[in-house]
């Protein structure tokens, strides 16, 4: 382990902090003994100038569980390392199980230290992680379980960075769950150890990687290009027959390289290429699920609820004139407008279940990314003053939207199960965080890849309606794969 950086040596975590942390753990332990249940302890300290991205880059190899979240919506960053507590869930009731476990654990939690009052929406310890596209309560789990939500032991959050390259203020938060049988002194000592370890890792040099020019790779499409286009023909045939109105068909590209992929470098490239996307990386043992999504599933800030309908895609043009022409085709296409309207109506209906008022912007906007442009509609709701509805309630009701699976949901998902031909895993699932008050952010996990050493599985999909053209849809998936291919430098 290299020597601590100047920032860490200057006192990011000092003797005063250790004493305060010990007092907090003792209070939590006493409450656990008094109440006869596990108690969540959360100790916080503002840090004036720590770069969460730098901490994540260097500290992620030191733990088997990590998360990076760089939000496009409030420019905040969350880095989570290590595990204080698992929030279990599996099968069709997985979101409900996580919501119940989180509500029970975060009720009457013990706070310590000094919280940063200027933090953005979302206060205190966070439940972080996500859910695979489909619940799987029967078979063996894949590389990532269908539910992976946890309370991190080490949590670092920052607001939007200041002007220039200097990082903005951040808040360090250390979390633990204590029972009457635990030793509070040992718990405080362990939290202090990981705080020093991870903060000292900031700005340490990363692991040397193989230069791109020396890396070779080969790829395999699953299913093959022709088989996938045939699936499109079969799907549109079922739509014309009235089995369902829309279905979202995905495909996978498996890549094997001659050397391991540099995940932090790939995250940096994703951020640079599309600043309007939310970049996430969920690390679990040797696997990392990495992505840069333009789409959020739901955000809750105070009493405001935000969802986003993002459906309808065309590639960017090679010239300004070609780009504008493709934008006009996107806006004027009756097929794409219908596909988009299906998604927006479902979002309105889902938010109406928990909100006293719901509005949707009109007409749809065009969102331009580096390689594609989309039709986009914001749908907003307002919670009642006494509402107990939180973000995980909306995650349960919204996922998967018609932009991820199809419409009607049950019929479309049933067809996909029988015909798509591979397990999506976390592709088109959801990733994000929730705080104890029910606020939080969850994104749609698209433009993503599952990485393990020198292996990568990349995913892309597109929404099909009755008159979808197989060649056009295949070209759309190729455009959607380009951001991740570029980030991994395998184009």
Image: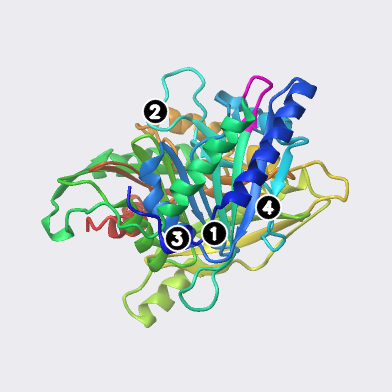
Q: How many marks?
A: 4
Q: Residue at x 47, y 67 (%)?
A: 330
Q: Secondary structure at mark 4?
A: loop
Query: Which one is in front, 38 or 403?
Result: 38
422 w.r.t. 233: above or below: above
Chain-order first, disc 3 or disc 1: 1
Please provide the residue range marked out in magenta.
Answer: 177-182
Percent x, y for residue 131? Answer: 52, 36
Closer to viewer: mark 3 or mark 2 = 2
Closer to viewer: mark 1 or mark 4 = 4
The answer for how far apart the CA atoms under marks 1 and 2 are is 27 Å
- The residue that disc 1 covers is 71
Query: Which one is in front, 11 or 328?
Result: 11
Chain-order first, disc 1 or disc 2: 1
Closer to viewer: mark 1 or mark 2 = 1
Closer to viewer: mark 3 or mark 4 = 4
Chain-order first, disc 3 or disc 2: 2
The answer for how far apart the CA atoms under marks 3 and 1 are is 22 Å
Q: Secondary structure at mark 2?
A: loop
Q: Which mark is residue 365?
A: none
The answer for how far apart the CA atoms under marks 3 and 2 are is 30 Å
Q: Which mark is residue 122?
A: 4
Occupied quadrant, residue 402: top right
178 drawn magenta: yes
**Majority secondary structure of magenta residues:** loop
- The residue that disc 2 covers is 142
Q: Secondary structure at mark 1?
A: loop
Q: Is residue 158 left or right of residue 320?
A: right
Chain-order first, disc 1 or disc 4: 1
- Confirm or deny contact between disc 1 and disc 2 (CB under 8 A): no
């Amino acid at each position: 382990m290299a020597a601590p950086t100047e920032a860490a040596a200057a006192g990011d975590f000092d003797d005063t902090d250790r004493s305060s942390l010990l007092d907090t753990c003792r209070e939590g332990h006493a409450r656990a003994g008094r109440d006869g249940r596990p108690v969540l302890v959360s100790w916080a300290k503002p840090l004036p100038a720590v770069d969460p991205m730098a901490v994540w880059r260097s500290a992620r190899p030191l733990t088997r569980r990590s998360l990076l979240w760089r939000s496009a919506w409030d420019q905040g960053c969350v880095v989570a390392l290590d595990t204080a507590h698992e929030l279990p869930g599996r099968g069709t009731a997985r979101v409900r199980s996580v919501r119940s476990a989180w509500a029970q654990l975060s009720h009457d939690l013990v706070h310590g230290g000094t919280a940063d009052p200027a933090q953005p929406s979302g206060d205190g310890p966070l439940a972080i992680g996500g859910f695979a596209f489909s619940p799987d309560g029967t078979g063996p789990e894949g590389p990532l379980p269908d539910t992976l939500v946890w309370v991190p032991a080490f949590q670092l959050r920052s607001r939007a960075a200041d002007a220039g390259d200097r990082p903005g203020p951040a808040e360090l938060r250390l979390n633990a769950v204590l029972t009457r049988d635990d030793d509070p002194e040992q718990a405080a000592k362990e939290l202090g150890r990981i705080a020093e370890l991870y903060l000292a890792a900031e700005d340490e040099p990363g692991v040397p990687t193989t230069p791109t020019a020396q890396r070779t790779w080969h790829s395999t499409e699953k299913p093959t290009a022709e088989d996938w286009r045939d699936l499109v023909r079969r799907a549109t045939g079922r739509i014309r027959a009235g089995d369902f109105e829309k279905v979202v068909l995905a495909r996978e590209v498996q890549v094997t390289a001659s050397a391991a992929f540099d995940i932090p470098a790939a995250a940096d490239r994703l951020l640079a290429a599309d600043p309007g996307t939310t970049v996430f990386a969920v690390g679990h043992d040797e696997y990392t699920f990495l992505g840069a999504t333009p789409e959020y599933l739901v955000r809750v800030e105070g009493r405001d609820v935000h969802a986003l309908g993002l459906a309808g895609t065309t590639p960017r043009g090679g010239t300004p004139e070609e780009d504008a022409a493709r934008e006009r085709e996107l806006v004027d296409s009756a097929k794409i407008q219908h596909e988009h309207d299906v998604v927006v109506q479902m979002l309105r209906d889902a938010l109406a279940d928990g909100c006293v008022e719901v509005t949707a912007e009109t007409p749809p906007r065009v969102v331009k990314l580096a390689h594609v442009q989309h039709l986009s509609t914001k749908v907003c709701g307002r919670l009642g003053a006494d509402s107990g509805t939180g973000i995980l309630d909306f995650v349960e009701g919204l996922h998967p939207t018609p932009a991820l699976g199809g419409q009607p949901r049950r019929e479309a998902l049933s067809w996909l199960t029988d015909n798509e031909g591979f397990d999506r895993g976390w592709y088109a699932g959801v990733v994000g965080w929730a705080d104890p008050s029910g606020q939080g952010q969850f994104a749609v996990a698209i433009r993503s890849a599952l990485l393990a050493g020198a292996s990568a599985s990349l995913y892309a999909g597109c929404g099909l309606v009755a008159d979808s053209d197989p060649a056009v849809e295949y070209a759309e998936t190729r455009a959607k794969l380009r951001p991740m291919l570029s980030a991994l430098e395998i184009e």
